[in-house]
Amino acid sequence: MHRIPTRETRPAAITATGLRKSYGDKTVLDGIDLHVPAGTVFSLLGPNGAGKTTTVQILSTLVSADAGQVRVAGHDLAAAPGSVRSAIGVTGQFSAVDKLLTAEENLRLMADLRHLGKRAGRRRATELLEAFDLADVAGKVAMTFSGGMLRRLDLAMTLMGGPQIIFLDEPTTGLDPRSRRAMWQIIRDLVAGGVTIFLTTQYLEEADQLADRIAVLDGGKLVAEGTAHELKRLVPGGHIRLEFTDPAGFERAARTLGEVTRDEEALTLRVPSDGGVRSLRSLLDRLDARAIEVGGLTVHTPDLDDVFLALTGQTIPTQDKESVR
């Protein structure tokens, strides 16, 4: 596995070692290791059937692992599942909202389940309705809500107990781009307040925008882990595109730089590069030493789509790509 080390000094919110799960003769998780620092967003990527949801179900005590050691919020998952449940919140792929109840009634129901008490529950419900921009529809039945409103209410219900760690299993599936970005801001605000987010998603832009670290799961195994920038650098194809205004400068640059891809008509050169500052500075120094003027410069690095394809051999479904643009 491509695991890029980190110098993270924050305490761990979640650790897992040798996590395994099978259903019959199908191995869903094949000995994965996880380390999620507190107060960060950790994103788990993978194609359908890779084991993302199973991982969330195990870490949130919904399903038992066949093997492995797990600690969540400082508690041993096997020895103290009740303590783990008290410290976490879960928002799954499908909304837990009761659509026959109003927004406020859904929140009060969660308050009762959390044993907050009548007064504390009402106060917390009011706070969450305001925070999630639902105060104006507090008395409306949830079946009248848009998809984005339902997801906000669902997450607000998850927060009723003040969890330290929130598992978000594909929380923006089916949302329009505006609603998705509104959810992203909510997630950023939660992390700024010290909450740890464990996010599974198929939207690569979502992981790129939100995650401090990303792990790629394929066939029940972790095949890579690192920051978005680190993962992109694992994939070849990065380059610097140089534009020239005159053929003479174009030819001199091509001779100076050696291994380049030429576009004679557009007077552009494509120079292989990892996109780093050091390689860019070295390139410019070589051109400057020969007094070669460049009309324009663009740095291109692989995106997470390229990483996903290289690591899993699969592309992101067309509808997923279109929905994040």
Image: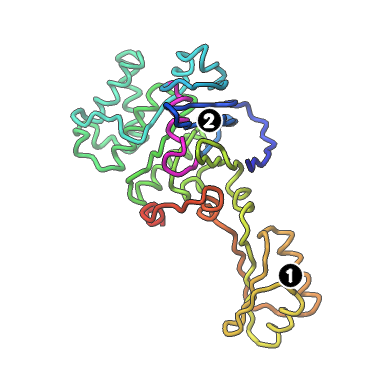
**Magenta-highlighted residues:** 45-61
Q: Which of marks 1 and 2 is nearer the N terminus?
A: 2
The quarter of the picture where residue 242 lies is bottom right
At 56% from the left and 22% from the top, the residue drawn is 68
Residue 223 on the magenta segment: no
Locate residue 146, reporting x and y percent. 25, 43
At 64% from the left and 81% from the top, the residue drawn is 244
Label 1: few (<14), some or many (≥20) within 10 Å?
few
The numbered mark at residue 32 is: none
Instruction: Give the labeled residue for mark 1.
Output: 284
Residue 212 makes an appearance in the image: no
Relative height, residue 89 to residue 186 (above, below) = above
Closer to the camera in the image, 251 or 156: 251
Q: Could you say whether the residue bearing mark 1 is in a helix, strand or loop? A: helix
Closer to the camera in the image, 11 or 62: 62
The numbered mark at residue 194 is: 2
